[in-house]
Amino acid sequence: MCRLISSLDQAIHNIIDFQSFIESSQDITERLAMHRAWYAYKVEGVWHFGSSKIIGYSNMTPLVYLRGGLDGRQTEATLQKWFTEIGPGEPLYGELWEKLSEFLANYGKNPSRLARINIPHSEVPSAAGANTEALCDLIIEVAKGLKSKDIADVRKRLKRLL
């Protein structure tokens, strides 16, 4: 029997295993374009994807999934504890949409026009991180008001970050 997952770690594990899961059944790969709620996690620079109706359950099997009767609303509510939707106006959206499209193209599918992509809360770029150029400009402007010895000290501290 499948139960809803209870941790972010379970969700990530299921996302990473999603490709193996769907490749175990042609019937499942045929349904990929119908999935609307996608969850992504980046491992060593590569985005992995999973759909909520599959990754939101622990001990899911292809047979159980194909039998039907699963409620995507329940998995969505559970997954939203740990994930944030990335909308069209956000910096990562273009990259995520492109990578999801490439992933589904491997199976001859395209994402639904109504597809949503979510990433873990911890992976959402902060406002400062999303606009690093403006942040760097601000740091330079502040540094212009420092004495030479203080600028040298800032340089040393910045080098320690590298």
Image (cartoon, helix red, strand yellow):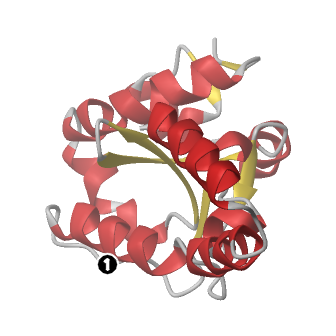
The front one of 99 and 45 is 45
Question: Picture coordinates of residue 75 (x, y %)?
Answer: 74, 40
Question: Picture coordinates of residue 140 (x, y %)?
Answer: 64, 74
Viewport quadrant of the C terminus = top left
Quarter where residue 24 is shown: top left
What's the residue at 76%, 17% (across, down)? 6
- Residue type, label 1: Asn
Q: Residue furthest front?
A: 148
Question: Picture coordinates of residue 67 (x, y %)?
Answer: 51, 36
In this picture, residue 131 sits left or right of residue 64? right
**Picture layout, residue 94 above or below residue 80:** below
What's the residue at 85%, 45% (across, down)? 77
Residue 70 appears in the picture as rendered: no
Instruction: Identify the residue position indicated by label 1 in the image.
Output: 110
What's the residue at 51%, 63% (across, down)? 35
In this picture, residue 6 sits left or right of residue 135? right
Residue 139 appears in the picture as rendered: yes
Crowding near the residue tagged with mark 1, few <14, some 14–19, many ≥20 C-alpha atoms within 10 Å: some
Total labels: the figure holds 1
Viewport quadrant of the N terminus = top right
Question: Picture coordinates of residue 118 (x, y %)?
Answer: 63, 57
In this picture, residue 96 sits left or right of residue 118? left
The front one of 16 and 138 is 138
**Picture layout, residue 14 above or below residue 102:** above
**Picture layout, residue 145 above or below residue 107:** below
Quarter where residue 25 is shown: top left
SS state under label 1: loop
The front one of 31 and 81 is 81
